[in-house]
Image: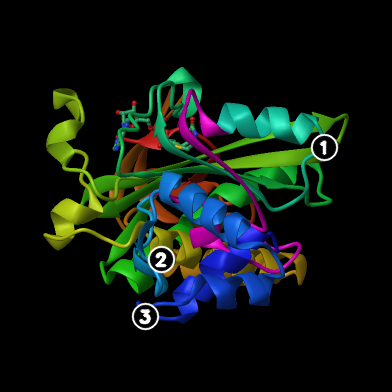
């Protein structure tokens, strides 16, 4: 733990009370000047700290930013145990791919307060104003290329469950990668990969969630289609808490995947699916398939029952 992290831990433990500079410097084994410098640095990160001469320091409020100090510490190997934070970046998925190619560890998290070139699937734009959660995770599972498709359904389930737990809203999954609240899109997942021949060398799992922003900040063409957690709750959501809940759910889901429980995960996904049981039209490239959404196959493909009694499986695309 760095002395800055140590300082923050001490201030947080004091629960809004004053801690003397002397006791902090003794506990961290650093000079009083180093303590003062640490306080200035925390203030630059957005922490509000009162300094009372002769009394000490106290934490008035934590930063609004999704900094490592608010996300962790997390156990080694877990998602989010390494954090790269950016105030502004083109795309966290793009950055994550660069980190992964440079050898970044499994579990590395890239987080941005805002994205200027956020990406959806197939070259689409993902609007990412301030107030959302825009993150990418690097995963290094030992899997074959065709198994990579399993990570989108696993992540949608984890994110939907975390939104339920941390925000108390019922989140549903619209196949294949949308999270809906009250029928409107609140989040999307973009899974990308780097591979060598048949083996995956890394996955980048991008997650975008509209949290503390009003849907009116999104382009007008999304009116009626997109929503935000703040709009649905009528109040702001603790973003750091929600992000920790997401990382916890993804850790659990990933551990289950490694134990061979993928089919059980897909079963759970059925319970929060906004698609199954509906009459749907799935568009995949130039192909259109209409019928009854019946279930998922073992990779997460959507089984559609056609009017002629046959079943077709659609692996990518969307429901219109
Ligand atoms: C997605 O694509 O839904 C995947 C979105 C992934 C975004 C994250 S943010 C962090 C990470 N870094 C990135 O660069 N990307 C990931 P798709 O299913 O293709 O949906 C894209 C469509 O959703 C757009 O064409 C719009 O219609 C709509 N859309 C764009 N921004 C939105 C927003 N903020 N909220 C709701 N809908 C949006």
**Upstream in the sequence, badge 3 or badge 2?**
3
Residue 60 appears in the figure: yes
167 with respect to 12 (left or right):
left
Q: SS class of the residue under badge 2?
A: helix
Q: Which residue is mark 1?
A: 103
Crowd band around label 3 with a 10 angstrom C-alpha radius: few (<14), some (14–19), many (20+): few
Q: Please tell me in which quadrant of the rendered image residue 33 appears.
A: bottom right
- 172 or 244, which lies in front? 244
Report if the CB atoms under discs 3 and 2 are less than 8 Å apart: no
Marks 1/3: CA distance? 42 Å
Q: Identify the residue at image location x=86%, y=35%.
A: 198
Q: Please tell me in which quadrant of the rendered image residue 276 appears.
A: bottom left
Q: SS class of the residue under badge 3?
A: loop
19 with respect to 50 (left or right):
right
Q: Position of residue 122 (x, y in %)?
A: 49, 22
Q: SS class of the residue under badge 1?
A: loop
Q: Which residue is mark 3?
A: 17
Q: Which residue is mark 2?
A: 241
Which segment did they paint magenta? 65-92
Which quadrant of the frame does ligand 1 lie within?
top left
Colouring scheme, one of rainbow, by chain, secondary structure, one colour: rainbow
**Upstream in the sequence, badge 1 or badge 2?**
1
* Residue furthest out toward the front: 54
Q: Identify the residue at image location x=31%, y=37%.
A: 130
Residue 145 appears in the figure: no
Marks 3/2: CA distance? 23 Å
**Upstream in the sequence, badge 1 or badge 3?**
3
Marks 1/2: CA distance? 29 Å
Q: Identify the residue at image location x=44%, y=81%.
A: 14
């Amino acid at each position: 733990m760095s002395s800055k992290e140590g300082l923050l831990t001490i201030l947080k433990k004091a629960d809004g009370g004053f801690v003397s500079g002397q006791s902090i410097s003794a506990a961290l084994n650093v000079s009083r000047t180093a303590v003062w410098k640490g306080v200035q640095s925390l203030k630059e990160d957005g922490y509000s700290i009162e300094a009372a001469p002769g009394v000490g320091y106290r934490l008035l409020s934590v930063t609004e930013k999704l900094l490592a100090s608010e996300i962790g510490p997390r156990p080694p190997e877990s998602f989010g145990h390494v954090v790269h934070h950016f105030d502004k970046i083109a795309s966290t998925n793009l950055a994550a791919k660069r980190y992964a190619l440079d050898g970044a560890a499994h579990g590395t998290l890239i987080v941005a307060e805002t994205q200027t070139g956020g990406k959806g699937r197939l070259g689409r734009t993902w609007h990412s104003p301030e107030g959302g959660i825009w993150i990418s995770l690097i995963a290094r599972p030992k899997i074959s290329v065709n198994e990579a498709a399993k990570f989108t359904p696993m992540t949608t389930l984890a994110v939907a469950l975390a939104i339920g737990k941390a925000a108390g809203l019922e989140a549903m999954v619209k196949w294949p990668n949308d999270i809906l609240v009250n029928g409107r899109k609140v989040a999307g997942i973009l899974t990308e990969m780097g591979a060598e021949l048949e083996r995956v060398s890394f996955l980048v799992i991008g997650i975008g969630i509209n949290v503390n922003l009003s849907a009116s900040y999104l382009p007008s063409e999304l009116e009626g289609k997109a929503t935000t957690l703040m709009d649905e709750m009528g109040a702001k959501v603790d973003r750091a808490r929600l992000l920790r809940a997401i990382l916890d759910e993804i850790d659990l889901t990933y551990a289950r995947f490694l134990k061979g429980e993928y089919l059980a995960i897909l079963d759970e996904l059925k319970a929060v699916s906004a698609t199954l049981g509906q009459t749907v039209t799935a568009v995949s490239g130039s192909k259109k398939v209409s019928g009854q959404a019946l279930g998922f196959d073992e990779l997460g493909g959507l089984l559609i029952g056609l009017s002629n009694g046959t079943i077709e499986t659609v692996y990518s695309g969307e429901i219109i």
